[in-house]
Amino acid sequence: MSELCKLWVNNREIEADGDRKLIDVLRNDLRLKSVKDGCSEGACGTCTVVIDGKATKTCVQKVSRMTGKHVLTVEGLSQREKDVFVYAFGEAGAVQCGFCIPGMVMCGKALIDANPAPSRLEIAAAIRNNICRCTGYKKIIDAIAMAADLLRTGQAIPVRGGYRGVGDPCQRINVKAKVLGIGKYTDDLDAVDLPGMCYGSAIRSAYPRAVVKAIHAEKAKALPGVVCVLTADDIPGSVKVGHLKSDWDTLIPVGSTTHFLGDAIVLVAAETPEILEQAKKLVDIEYEELPALTCAADALKEGAPLVHPSAGTNILAHEHLVRGDADAVIAASKYKVTHHFETPWTEHAFLEPECAVAMPFDDGVFIYSSDQGIYDTRRETALMLGLPEEKVIVENCFVGGGFGGREDVTVQHLAALVAYVCKRICKVKLTRQESILIHPKRHQFSMDLTTACDEKGKLTAMKLVAVTDNGAYASLGGPVLQRACTHAAGPYNYQTIDIDGTAVYTNNPPAGAFRGFGVTQTIFATELNLNKLAELVGIDPWEIRYRNAIRPGQVLPNGQIADPSTGLAETLDAVKDVYYHSGPYVGIACALKNSGVGVGLPDYGRCRLVVKENMVHI
């Protein structure tokens, strides 16, 4: 322990070890949970507070640098300031997942104190080091501007009337909890909330593809404070889980082969995070490294090693959509363009790293989680533990962003395994680096696309061959490929298509759900080809889209009849003047996307009606 340092936090003098991070003291000692831990490396801004009047990230500040300084968190704001920021952020619609919002509020507080009437440009500059992945910055700028006006003028906070029904503006019901940082995300649960909590983490593969030859964990087990060191042999049910296909190893068994660098091999739990990290370093794993498949083209070659030998192939899924004879129609068309397109993997970068807390519950487990599908978490955890689903209860805390990246289990089942085997409450949280490595990405696509039209620019046919790198596990790769193919021809009126798609296993991180669900990749290629066709015809990109825009009653290339609500032509009309008067650098593109489940599956809406006494009907 280094020298104790004195500092002021929310006008209270405290002492803390100078070697510790300020975020650790604020969150864990003082339990100021508005200070969020998004990255621990000064990149995201979710841990921002005000230190001596300046907005500062606490995850990169040592306590030793805080001696004599005054630290202010959201909890320390005046009641007037709290009320104003809650109203302003709610009224502006600036709150979605909420994980970034307390940090944004403190940036706004520091700015307004120094400049009571900031311009929008000054507000943008004040929050430039804080990331938002849900709302976007315009509404946050609106909120800070509104807060500045209320605080400067001293005017009363407006009071809203009753809501008459659908279409009336209203604030989110959880705005206050998210703006003030009092809403619970999973990592906000601590040993005060849940006494006896231990901490778990997985040791992950040193190689994307290697045989696990032996695990030596004796030194780790002997370390005081270690709760358990678990391997695949300790899993009471199925080692393999998965969102749609059970091909994802919870822990790689000795004698088996790893599939990517994120594969968990050993699960360690300890009384403190510090002991946990020490114990992980004491586990020795022997490997036999094997050549890895790092691209889909190599995985499709004859004789390529199989990522999953039990599957008998590296092809996860294949889709082939055919209407008419595309080759013949393309050959007979006046104009045609052929291009090869590549789109990269994309990281979700949601601000809250994955975290779960599990505890023994009767003869099963109870899990607090931050995910997008508690029923799937329940099903997969029950499968791993060998329990009926009713023995696994999952409750979501607030979720700090998702975008599809939280549909697969990452830490939930690991926390549950410790809780079930050791009968201890256990928290498992990924670091930012682990989060980026492990959870599924947007798929990388390789596409060869030919699009054709007649002399007037009317589309006649398209032919697409698309190959996706699905990475090490299935995740939602099959449905993503399906949506990519069924939407690839775009929202246009022509009938002849030949669309061939293949999803391929490799030793890269898995790919799965991401906003757009495969459509963004194929539509990107389609729209670029359309621009090239417009050049050949001698018309502009707006005109070729307008001539071909799908209209009510017409048939899309995938065979779907456009219903009366179809408004693509009207949408193009609405942006026509902007397009033609915005200079040479404006672009235009169109897209379509299924609403709900799609592909003809039933999609039910549900609501709960509650009758209360003395309700006023407006």
Image (spheres, rainbow, N blue to C red):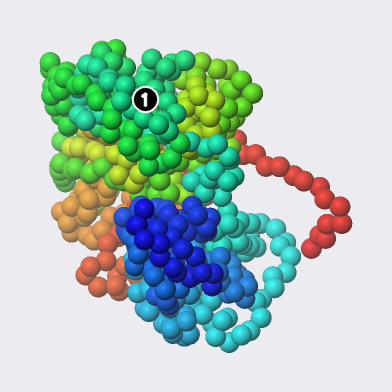
Q: Residue at x 52, y 49 (%)?
A: 188
In the image, residue 580 sits, relative to residue 298, either above or below, namely below
Residue 119 in view of the camera: yes
The residue depicted at 36 percent of the width and 53 percent of the height is: 1
Q: Is residue 140 above or below residue 501?
A: below
Q: Is residue 77 left or right of residue 540?
A: right
User: In the picture provided, is 605 more to the left or to the right than 234?
Assistant: right
**Residue 227 in the image: x percent, y percent?**
44, 29
Q: x, y (%) of residue 104?
A: 45, 66
In the figure, 70 relative to 189: above or below? below
27 or 569: nearer the viewer? 27
Q: Is residue 175 above or below residue 434?
A: below
Q: Is residue 504 visible?
A: no
* Quadrant the C terminus occupies: bottom right
- Relative placement, left or right, of 604 versus 491 is right
Q: Residue at x 87, y 57 (%)?
A: 614
Rendered location of residue 452, percent (x, y): 21, 43
Name the residue tied to disc 1. Answer: 221
Q: Amino acid at mark 1?
A: Lys
Q: Residue at x 55, y 85 (%)?
A: 152
